[in-house]
Image: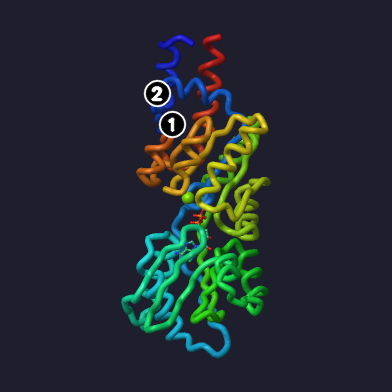
C-alpha cells in the first residue's frame, strides 16, 4: 500500500463525507464482509413520536398519564423524551416531580409518583417484577407488528397501560441496504427493541437478518460472535450504547449526527448521517486497495 494512494483515497472519501481517522482504517475497511447496523438513529431517524396511550380497564386515563409523565420526564432516553413530549403536547397532563427515579438501561424506568410505584418498559422488566401483563399481549403484538415500540406500564405492581412510539426509517436506508447487498455484504440489524418491532422495521429497510432484544452490554458480544465465525465486521451506530460494539468491530462507523461517545469509539465518521456513507466507505476502500496491488 503506497502512502500516496491511501492519502488520495482518504481525500476522495472525505469529499463524500466519510472521515477515516487514519489511513490504516481505510486499508482495513477493504476486508469487511459483514455490516452490522444499529436500528434506532442509524437505520431509523431516531426521533420517535408517541402514537398510542391505551389505559387498561379500571384505571383513570388522566391519572395514569400524570404518573407516566412523572417517570419519563426524568429520563434522557429518546423513548422517554418521545413519551414526555407527546403527553405534554396532549395538553392537560399535570407535571409533577417523582419522589424517586431510576433508569434501567435496556429495560425501562422505575419511579415513585404521588406514592405510586410506576414502572414503564419491556415485558422482561414486568416479568422480573412479577407483573401479570397477559391482558396486554394482543394489543402489544398488534402495535409491534406495525413497527412501533410498545411499552408496558405498571402501577403498584398491576398492569395499567400501554404506551407506543413510532420511529420512521431514513429515506435513504432502503436503497443503501440494497447497495450493500449488491456489493456482496452480509447485512445484520442489531437492536435492544423487541423481535416483532425489529422485524417490521428491518423489512421496511430490506434487511433480512436481525438480532433483537440485545441488552446494552450485549451489542459488543454480538460483534465478537460474528468475528468468531470468521467474519470481518463493520459496526454502524450512533448511541452511547453502541460505543463498545463500535470499538470491538473490525471497523467502527459512527453516524455523524450521533453521540460524541459513538464518534470517539469509531474509526470512521459518516458526516452525511445516512447509510450511503457505509457503502461509499467500503467500495472506496476496495477500489483504493485494488489499485495499489
Ligand atoms: P435501542 O437499542 O433500540 O435504543 P434500548 O436498549 O435503549 O433500545 O432499550 C430497549 C428497550 O427497553 C426499549 O425498546 C424499551 O422497550 C425499553 N426502554 C428503554 N428505556 C426506556 C424508557 N425510558 N421508558 C420506557 N421503556 C424503555
Ligand atoms: Mg441508536
Percent of width and height locating residue 225: 63, 38
At 48% from the left and 65% from the top, the residue drawn is 108
152 vs 127, nearest the viewer = 127
Per the image, the residue denoted by label 1 is: 267
Q: Position of residue 43 (x, y in %)?
A: 53, 48
State whether residue 85 appears in this view.
no
Q: In this orientation, which residue lies closer to the viewer: 36 or 117?
A: 117
Q: Earlier in the sequence, mark 2 or mark 1?
A: 2
Q: In the image as oriented, which residue stretches furthest toward the bottom?
A: 58
Colouring mode (rainbow / by chain / secondary structure / one colour): rainbow
In the displayed structure, 120 sits above or below 12; it is below
Residue 124 image label: none
Look at the numbered discs 2 and 1 and tell me whether their residues touch, using CB distance below 8 Å.
yes
Q: Residue at x 39, y 22 (%)?
A: 11
Other-residue count near label 2 (Cα within 10 Å), few / some / many at <14 / 14–19 / ≥20: few
Q: Quadrant of residue 71?
A: bottom left
Amino acid at each position: 500500500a503506497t502512502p500516496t494512494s491511501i492519502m488520495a483515497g482518504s481525500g476522495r472519501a472525505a469529499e463524500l463525507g466519510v472521515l477515516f481517522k487514519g489511513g490504516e482504517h481505510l486499508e482495513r475497511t477493504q476486508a469487511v464482509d459483514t455490516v452490522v447496523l444499529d436500528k434506532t438513529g442509524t437505520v431509523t431517524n431516531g426521533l420517535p413520536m408517541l402514537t398510542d396511550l391505551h389505559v387498561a380497564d379500571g384505571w383513570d386515563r388522566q391519572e395514569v398519564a400524570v404518573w407516566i409523565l412523572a417517570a419519563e420526564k426524568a429520563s434522557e432516553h429518546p423513548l422517554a423524551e418521545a413519551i414526555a413530549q407527546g403527553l405534554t403536547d396532549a395538553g392537560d397532563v399535570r407535571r409533577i416531580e417523582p419522589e424517586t427515579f431510576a433508569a434501567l438501561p435496556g429495560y425501562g424506568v422505575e419511579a415513585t409518583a404521588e406514592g405510586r410505584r410506576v414502572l414503564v418498559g419491556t415485558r422482561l422488566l414486568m416479568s422480573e417484577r412479577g407483573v401479570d401483563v397477559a391482558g396486554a399481549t394482543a394489543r402489544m403484538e398488534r402495535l409491534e407488528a406495525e413497527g412501533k415500540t410498545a411499552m408496558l406500564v405498571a402501577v403498584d405492581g398491576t398492569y395499567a397501560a400501554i404506551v407506543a412510539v413510532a420511529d420512521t426509517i431514513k429515506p435513504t436506508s432502503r436503497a443503501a441496504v440494497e447497495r450493500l447487498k449488491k456489493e456482496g455484504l452480509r447485512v445484520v440489524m442489531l437492536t435492544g427493541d423487541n423481535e416483532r418491532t425489529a422485524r417490521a422495521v428491518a423489512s421496511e429497510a430490506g434487511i433480512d437478518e436481525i438480532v433483537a432484544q440485545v441488552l446494552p452490554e450485549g451489542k459488543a458480544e454480538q460483534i465478537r460472535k460474528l468475528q468468531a465465525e470468521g467474519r470481518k465486521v463493520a459496526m454502524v451506530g450512533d448511541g452511547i450504547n453502541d460505543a463498545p460494539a463500535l470499538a470491538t468491530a473490525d471497523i467502527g462507523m459512527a453516524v455523524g449526527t450521533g453521540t460524541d461517545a459513538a464518534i470517539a469509539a469509531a474509526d470512521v465518521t459518516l458526516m452525511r448521517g445516512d447509510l450511503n456513507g457505509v457503502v461509499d466507505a467500503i467500495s472506496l476502500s476496495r477500489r483504493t486497495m485494488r489499485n495499489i496491488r
